[in-house]
Image: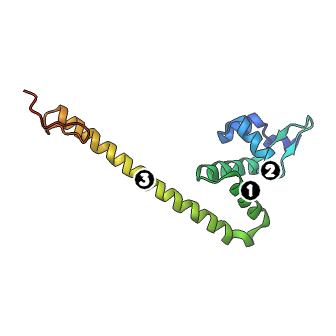
């Protein structure tokens, strides 16, 4: 019973990691959580290291990794320190992709800020309204 203090049920692990039960079960069934332990009732249980790894899986997924890429990354992790350069290369590619997405998102945010300010200025009478879709040059008097 001493060891069970730091073992968490599926539900507890879901709460700790923010994953749904189905997602955690899927990750386990796909072999993405190695060395899954079982309690006396044969239910999966997770220790603190498992929880940290599951949090890493969530991050990798959010980085745009596919399940097969996550499996490859896990395989390299399990092979030990000598695979660090390969893991760095994988993460570098994902970082570059994320940086590009961030630039695109920032462009969209900038556009929305500009458009909101334009609308505010039009409504306050500071600038004349124009549109690229309709003719606004007609005199409305």
Q: Secondary structure at mark 3?
A: helix
Q: Please tell me which residue is depicted at 72% across the width and 70% down the height of the picture.
A: 83
Looking at the image, tell me whether mark 1 or mark 2 is earlier in sequence order.
Answer: 2
Image location of residue 109, percent across then percent down: 37, 46
Image location of residue 86, percent across then percent down: 68, 69
Image location of residue 91, percent across then percent down: 61, 63
74 relative to 120 in the view: left or right:
right
Would you name the residue on which mark 2 appears?
31
Q: Are marks 1 and 2 in contact (CB under 8 Å)?
A: yes
Work out whether 89 lies above or below 10: below
Would you name the residue on which mark 3 appears?
104
Q: Please tell me which residue is depicted at 74% across the width and 56% down the height of the picture.
A: 71
Assign the N terminus to one quadrant of the image: top right
Q: Secondary structure at mark 2?
A: loop
Q: CA distance from mark 1 to mark 2?
A: 8 Å
Q: Please tell me which residue is depicted at 16% across the width and 32% down the height of the picture.
A: 124
Q: Please tell me which residue is depicted at 76% across the width and 51% down the height of the picture.
A: 32
């Amino acid at each position: 019973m001493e060891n069970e203090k730091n073992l968490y049920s599926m539900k507890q692990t879901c709460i700790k990691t923010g994953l749904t039960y189905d997602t955690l079960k899927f990750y386990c069934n796909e072999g993405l959580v190695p060395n899954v332990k079982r309690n006396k009732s044969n239910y999966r249980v997770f220790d603190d290291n498992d929880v940290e790894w599951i949090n890493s899986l969530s991050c990798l997924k959010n980085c745009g990794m596919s399940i097969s890429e996550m499996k490859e990354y896990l395989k390299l992790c399990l092979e030990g320190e000598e695979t660090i350069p390969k893991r760095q290369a994988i993460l570098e590619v994902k970082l570059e992709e994320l940086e590009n997405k961030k630039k695109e998102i920032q462009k969209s945010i900038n556009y929305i800020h500009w458009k909101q300010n334009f609308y505010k200025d039009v409504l306050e009478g500071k600038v004349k309204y124009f549109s690229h879709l309709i003719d606004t040059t007609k005199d409305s008097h």
